[in-house]
Amino acid sequence: MIKTNASRKSRSALCLTIMGLGLFFSAGCTTVAPYERAKLAHPTMAANEMAGPGEEHLRAVTEGAIGGSAGAGSGCGCN
């Protein structure tokens, strides 16, 4: 049995559609109950002022960039 080019294209389109739907439904979007939000709200996620240089360093490390303050460096390597 010889497969035609059209049947190969339709089969690959079907596979891509199934994979796309699988990714769409496994995205993990859900609503969070108010009593569960405290578990998700980590203190380092707050945007309030930092108290000292240690906490500023922690923010710089967790955010992945340094810049916008009095310190040198912008985090992108374009100094």
Image (tube, rainbow, N blue to C red):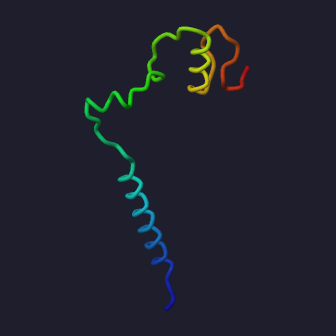
Up-down relation of residue 27 to residue 45 (above or below): below
- Circle count: 0
Query: Which percent across, then down, holds residue 52?
Result: 58, 9
Up-down relation of residue 10 to residue 17 (above or below): below
Query: Which percent across, then down, holds residue 19?
Result: 43, 61
Up-down relation of residue 78 to residue 70 (above or below): below
Comparing 47 with 75, the one in front is 47
Q: Which residue is located at x 43 percent, y 72 percent?
A: 10
Q: Quadrant of the C terminus?
A: top right
Query: Which percent across, then down, holds residue 5?
Result: 51, 78
Q: Which residue is located at x 45 percent, y 12 percent?
A: 48
Kindly give the residue lying farthest to the bottom in the view shown.
Answer: 1
Left or right, 51 with respect to 31, comes to right
Left or right, 38 with respect to 60, comes to left
Query: Which percent across, then down, holds residue 72?
Result: 70, 13
Which image quarter: residue 23? bottom left
Which image quarter: residue 21? bottom left
Q: Which residue is located at x 28 percent, y 38 percent?
A: 31
Up-down relation of residue 51 to residue 1 (above or below): above
Q: Which residue is located at x 47 percent, y 70 percent?
A: 12
Comparing 27 with 43, the one in front is 43
Comparing 29 with 39, the one in front is 39
